[in-house]
Structures are given as structure tokens and as C-alpha cells.
């Protein structure tokens, strides 16, 4: 394995760590953190793809032989903003769930919700 491909391997490993955390964790806050790790791995991958060794910025001077395409970097800036916004919404929803159920564990929330619906169905 060369150092040229190291960033691809790091992004893949981060993606698998994030995915495993999302699937295996029952805590909503841990799921949000793992979702952020997953997102960072995608950002790292796309920024790595956009990099060209020895290339220059795409500013027209004389003759540019190799240049770096700025589009992946610009798209990742947009993805960072979307990621921060979705994290804020996820944290706000987690706070509301904590206020409503008193916990942020998925299995406990499902159990409390099941009991609530069972009581409501007995009343009918």
C-alpha cells in the first residue's frame, strides 16, 4: 500500500466505523455522532478525488497544463453546511425525545411507546 492511496483507505475505514456505529448503537446521540463520522469519510473521499498532484489552481495566466478541478471542493463545502444543519436538527429532535420519553435509548423508547399504545387501545 502506497501513501498515495492512504487517504482512500482512511475514508473507507471511517465510513465502515460510522456505518457500524449507526447500525449497532441503540443510543440516538451515538447514532448522530456515527452519522457525522460517516459524512466526514464521504467528504474526505471526494476532496481526495478532486486533488491532482503537482497541479495548479485554475486561474488563467499563461498556459495551464494541469489544474485542480474546484467543483468537488465547492460541493463539499455545501455538504459541510448541510451536514451541520442536519446535525442541529437531529440534536433538536433528540432533545425533544428526551423530554417526552425521558431516555434516548431506542429499545426503551419503543417499549414505552408500545405500552402507551396498548393502554390507548384498551380504553377504546
Image (cartoon, grey):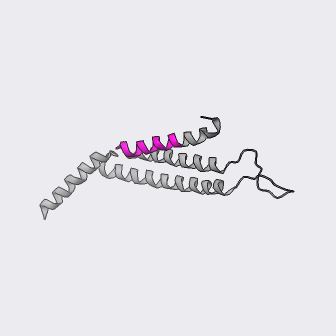
Q: Main secondary structure of the magenta part?
A: helix
Q: Position of residue 71 (x, y in %)?
A: 66, 58
> Along the line of sight, which residue is nearer the eye, 22 or 64?
64
Among the 4 quarters of the image, the one containing residue 27: top left
Region of the chain picked out in magenta, as a range: 12-29
Question: In the image, is 99 to the left or to the right of 81?
Answer: left
Judge from the rendering whether residue 37 lies leftward or rightward of residue 46; answer left or right: left
x 63%, y 46%: residue? 48
Measured as percent of width and height from the top left, residue 34 is found at: 45, 44
User: Is 70 part of what is drawn in magenta?
Assistant: no
Which is nearer the eye, 10 or 100? 10
Residue 4 to residue 90: above or below:
above
Count of number-bearing discs: 0
Q: Quadrant of the N terminus?
A: top right
Residue ID at (68%, 48%): 51
- State which quarter of the image contains the C terminus: bottom left
Amino acid at each position: 500500500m502506497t501513501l498515495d492511496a492512504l487517504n482512500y483507505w482512511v475514508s473507507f475505514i471511517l465510513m465502515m466505523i460510522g456505518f457500524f456505529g449507526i447500525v449497532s448503537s441503540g443510543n440516538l446521540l451515538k447514532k448522530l455522532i456515527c452519522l457525522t463520522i460517516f459524512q466526514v469519510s464521504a467528504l474526505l473521499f471526494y476532496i481526495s478525488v478532486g486533488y491532482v498532484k503537482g497541479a495548479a489552481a485554475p486561474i488563467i495566466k499563461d498556459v495551464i497544463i494541469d489544474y485542480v478541478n474546484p467543483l468537488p471542493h465547492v460541493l463539499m463545502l455545501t455538504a459541510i453546511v448541510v451536514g451541520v444543519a442536519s446535525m442541529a436538527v437531529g440534536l433538536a429532535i433528540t432533545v425533544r425525545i428526551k423530554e417526552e420519553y425521558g431516555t434516548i435509548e431506542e429499545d426503551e423508547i419503543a417499549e414505552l411507546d408500545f405500552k402507551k399504545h396498548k393502554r390507548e387501545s384498551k380504553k377504546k
